[in-house]
Amino acid sequence: MNIGIIGGGMGGLISALLLERQGFSVTLFEKEERLGGRLAYVERDGFKIDQGPTIVLLPHLLEEILTEAGISRNDYQIIQCDPLYSITFSDGTRYTKYPDLTRQLEEIRSTFPGEEKGFQRFLEDGKNRFTLGKKAFLDHAFVPKKTFWTYENMKTLLKLKPYQSVKKLMNSYFQDERLQIAYSLQTLYIGGDPFHAPALYSLVPFSEHEHGVYYLKGGYAGLLSILEQELKNRSISIWKNTRVTRIIREENRVTGLVADGTYISFDGIVYNGDYPLLSNLMDMPEKRAFSPSSSCVLIYFGLNRVYEDADVHQFFISRDFKKHMKAVFEDKTVPEAPSFYTFHPSKIDASLAPPGKGVLYTLIPVPSGQHID
């Protein structure tokens, strides 16, 4: 069978390798002159830094899918961050998260005395919710809708408390609002509002403690050369600078696509792109309304030194975190006193800058949309 893949980001590249291993003939189409999508560096004067994500969560899942795709574990290196990261609040309080329970309880005892039992309860409940959620949802695909809307799944969802926001759920564990924020802000990883995102996403801060926070040496963009070489080794057909403008469907079956004005027949199509854009390529049976997630301002610094006293990942919380989130997600205005995140990988990876120098990445959540300059 011949499979066409639209989009050469990480999902498209992995899909091509997985399908080829299963015996399919694969052709990958990428509209840009390079593969990788967000697997890319910003580079200048010997400095380079990831354009895309920075934190590796659930590293065993990344390892599993790369192994399944045929990538050797010897081709890349994952480093555990210790500490996981630190959070600095506007009053000067600094809270650090660690990969082991003993040090974490000591940190809470010294920084937020009296909150130890709430933290332990958060971990216990998180372990139960993660076990339930992984078995019911992460380990399954729900192509027919009826396979999701089952009695057992509904019972599981109620136990995961999707009707609560992450922030409200954290209020039930921690008395100090700073700790509530420290275990709610992770919804921003996927552009979600901590004050409205469903409590299901509380599994992210739990997982950071349970499974750790990791860094992929060389950055995520370093995966691109590994994946691209494997594609070449297997002689997988790749069409760069080729824009797919139409997916052809006859009744309920996809039969091919149109790329740069040429029709090409396929037995199946994999679309690796944003779902709302799919309606531009084919007639959808139903139109859905979408609300975009937050956007961000990214600032890349080339430094004349490495800050050894800084953590790889750091969060800096403004004096009014709720006001910042309201500006981003509700008012759609530029925040006056924003919180922000910094990434300083040079502390554990010397390959990103000239000798003795470093890189720093700063992310500031802002509203999405074209109405802001």
Image (cartoon, rainbow, N blue to C red):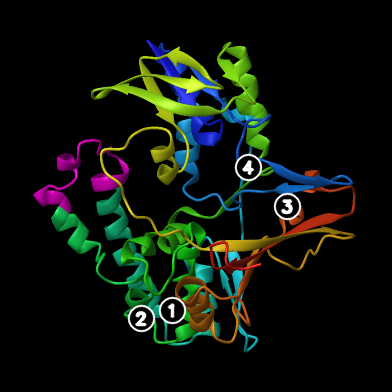
Q: Earlier in the sequence, mark 3 or mark 1?
A: 1
Q: Earlier in the sequence, mark 2 or mark 4?
A: 2
Q: Nearer the viewer, mark 2 or mark 3?
A: 2
For marks 1 and 2, give the CA distance.
6 Å
Task: Check disc 4 and give the amino acid type.
Answer: Tyr
Q: Is residue 315 visible?
A: no
Instruction: Kindly check if marks 1 and 4 are in contact, taking CB atoms under 8 A apart as contact.
Output: no
The residue that disc 4 covers is 220
SS at badge 3: loop
Left or right of residue 156: residue 185: right
The residue that disc 3 covers is 348
Residue stretch rendered in magenta on the structure: 135-153
For marks 2 and 4, give the CA distance.
34 Å
Q: Position of residue 368 (x, y in %)?
A: 53, 63
Q: Is residue 31 magenta?
A: no
Q: Position of residue 306 (x, y in %)?
A: 83, 60
